[in-house]
Image (cartoon, rainbow, N blue to C red):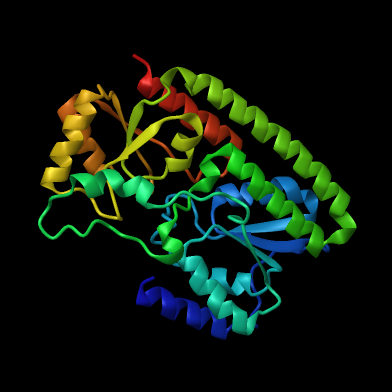
Amino acid sequence: MRVVCLLLTVTALAGCRDSASWPPDAGQLRTFASIPPAAYLVERIGGPHVQVGVLVGPGQSPHTFEPTPRQVAALCEAQAFFTIGLPFERLIVAKLAATRPELRVVDLRDGIELLPAVEHVHEAVAAQSEPGASGGHAHGEDAYDPHFWLDPQRARIAASTIAIALQQLDPSHGEEYAQRLAGVQVELAELDARIAARLAPFHGREFFVFHPAYGYFADRYGLKQVAIETAGKEPGARRLTHLIERARAARARVIFYEPQFSAAAAQAVARELGARVIPLDPQARDYLRNLDDIAAKTEEALRP
């Protein structure tokens, strides 16, 4: 996390007693989620009894995100913070531990089998022969891929974690949270079945992306993502040549990129292939609709 983020957070926390911009709550729980898909699940399960703020907004990357003083001040008045294991979250939680120890921090990774980040950079490690290439090794919590929500089955586990936390914070509405969870679980199971049927004919196929956000999606549906960016860095000349050759061998017709990142590298690969560049957003707030959209675009990209 950059120094400016640290200073920003410390400044906000120093004013933790200041009033934040929460709407009138009428007895509702005040909660925060790091990313829009997590906020969506909290909203669906919490219903009218929960207010949900979100830190990372549209077009922002969680990997480079810096919270504003206003956001951190709002967190100071929240009762729960739903996290996914990102570096900026750990910084905020560490600072809030001293000034807001009663804040319930809920790690949505609990109970989820995480994929190591190396699963998404191993192609780069094998192919990198650029001068000064380091291989992009990660350590500690950063050794794991945080994009678990792109697998509906893992999202079901996260949904259960959310419901349990809400029931503990607000036992008077516990039965309603359980009922809402049951409905969400059914929808997630149906979503998973739809995507599995849609992508079954393409088992083992490669799809090409700019940022390696789709490892869990690929793992769930028997696909292989090949990423242009690795370890937060765009490819050098040799890596780019390797990617173009590999995409050509796979007869790739589409290169996906995220709106949170520049499309330049994806466009460079696409130009060499005569392929299209299409956006995919792993952070869109309407989780169910977005996963259906990602599956449809992936099917289109892989169809002969």
- Indicate left or right for 214 with 157 as reference: left
User: Residue 158 location in percent, x, y?
Assistant: 64, 49
Residue 12 in sight in this render: yes
Residue 16 in sight in this render: no
- Indicate left or right for 166 with 111 as reference: right
Q: Place residue 254 in its image quadrant.
A: top left
User: Residue 209 location in percent, x, y?
Assistant: 33, 38
Q: Is residue 204 above or below residue 228?
A: above
User: Residue 45 location in percent, x, y?
Assistant: 74, 47
Residue at the outermost right position: 172
- Residue occupying the point 47% across, 24% down: 296
Q: Place residue 171 in its image quadrant.
A: bottom right
Q: Quadrant of the N terminus?
A: bottom left
Q: Nearer the viewer, residue 223 or 290?
A: 223
- Residue occupying the point 22% across, 46% down: 126
- Residue occupying the point 19% across, 44% down: 127
Q: Nearer the viewer, residue 94 or 222?
A: 222
- Residue occupying the point 42% across, 21% down: 202
User: Residue 264 location in percent, x, y?
Assistant: 23, 43
- Indicate left or right for 163 with 92 as reference: right
Count of marks, rendered view: 0
Q: Is residue 268 above or below residue 43?
A: above
